[in-house]
Amino acid sequence: MDQEIAPFLLFTEDDCRPDTPHLRMEIAMGTRLTEDSGCDILVTIRRTRDMHEEPCIFNWSGYKDGCGPLGYLLFRHTENGLRKIDIDMGSNLFGPPQMPFIVDGFRSTWEMAPEGNVKFMPGLSKRYRKELKTGAKYELVWPGGEIAIWDWGTIKQHIGQELGIKSPKICLPAARVTLEFSEVGTPKLSVVLECEKAVPRSGQGPVRISVTYEAAPESSPIIFHTAPFGSWYGPREGYRLYRRRGDLWETVEEDDSCFMIVDEPDIAVNVVQDKHFATLQPGQTWTTSKQLDGRLPDDVVAGDLFRFVFKGVEVDWWDWGGNTEHKNTTVKLPCFINGRVVEPNDNGGRQKLIVPASNSVEFTIVELGQIEPVACIAWIMDEDVAVKAVAGNKEKADIELLRCRNQDKKDVVEGNICAILLRPDESKLRDKRQKAQNREETTYCLVRALFCDSHRVNALQHTF
């Protein structure tokens, strides 16, 4: 890193001149900054041992000199090393550099005794702040410079007198500080539920759950533990199922508690490799599903109206960054795995990530015959496999096997077995059959199966 910055440095401690005060500069900032946090620079200028015993005064402005055209340089850490960021200094933003003035005790005039120091805290200019991207790491570098306005003595001795350019100039050597620019607080996750409007009395058919990371495109990716989105029921969070009773919604109480003894050691997992963790870029969505099987009351009848909702949850572990940043990050889960992170138990000191409640979805219980069937057409190589796969689906309306010929086996096997999902459309079916009849050489089967549930069709396709 030093070698990457070195070509940009103008003055180092080796450039200090014998007949001037020997100064050294230190800069410090908060290690993790956000858009809401202060962005001040703690500047410390120390006078090291030199050949003079008298005090000195000099003029140096944290804004005009530090953030001016010859001031701080900004470098961003990338996979390929440091990259210098060009800062737009505009025009006419600064007056003439280091012009003589009458000493009045202000105007960024500092007094320094031998081996003394001064501290001040100017803000980092907006010209620099607008270049900071969330989740990125930076080096803010003072490249070194010269102080032309200075003299020996105290401010009191020079009050009312002109302080002008003195030769030789004081050397103010290079300095730097590392900083990270983070998202404000915590990331924002939202949950959306989807399900069929009509659900058979058996409860077959999942509720689809989409968790979306809402952030600007340039924001940092995030990684989080997905287990909290799998919990059915908690005191104030998780999922709730309600049944309409007259004008009221009645909570369907859970009855799936069990007793389990867990005294095995906790298990360390890598958050990138473990399936219970997910990484999202801004705008991306992680999806899962919840099955209604066994969740409906025993006395459910056709016509009952239900409502399903996600009440919100606190994510037990999350962090900024994606797979690259966390390729070596490990946490500990309980021995039964599907539980909350036990180490670290405080999410590494990061703020709590609260995910708000989702939309609610409603569905009506119906008899199987009331559901509009959907069609699955799939090419497979073995008629017996087709019959077994379809026969395993008790809700089929009919099965149709057509002999056909196919010239290219690769098209069948690697092309997702030519599977398509559609509502019954005879014109499409006829077109598909015609294409099948025009193929030659290898014999395959065309299966058409009508089902009451589109998710069953998806399962059938995966079976093939």
Image (cartoon, rainbow, N blue to C red):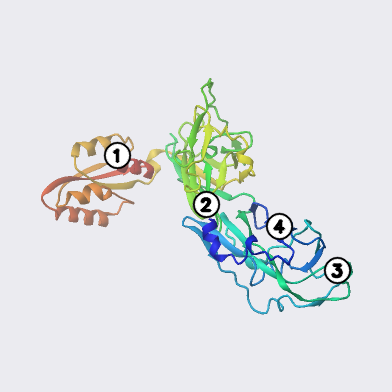
Disc 1 to disc 4, C-alpha distance: 57 Å
Q: Nearer the viewer, mark 2 or mark 3?
A: 3
Q: Which numbered disc, 3 or 4, marks the residue that appears first in the sequence?
A: 4
**Picture quadrant where residue 145 is located:** bottom right
Q: Under tag 2, what secondary structure?
A: loop
Q: Residues within 10 Å of mark 4 (few under 14, many from 20)?
A: few
In the image shown, does 238 or 453 lie closer to the viewer? 238
Residue identifier under label 2: 221
In the image shown, does 399 or 329 lie closer to the viewer? 329
Disc 3 to disc 4, C-alpha distance: 27 Å
Q: Which numbered disc, 1 or 3, marks the residue that appears first in the sequence?
A: 3
Quadrant where the C terminus sits is: top left
Q: Nearer the viewer, mark 1 or mark 4?
A: 4
Disc 1 to disc 2, C-alpha distance: 35 Å
Residue 330 position, x and y percent, is: 51, 37
Residue identifier under label 1: 463
Q: Which numbered disc, 2 or 3, marks the residue that appears first in the sequence?
A: 3
* Residue kind at label 1, given as amino acid type: Thr
Q: Nearer the viewer, mark 2 or mark 4?
A: 4
Task: Kindly indicate whether the residue at mark 4 contacts the one at mark 1 (C-beta within 8 angstroms).
Answer: no
Residue identifier under label 3: 105
Q: Under tag 1, what secondary structure?
A: helix
Task: Kindly indicate whether the residue at mark 3 contacts the one at mark 1 (C-beta within 8 angstroms).
Answer: no
Residue 168 position, x and y percent, is: 71, 72
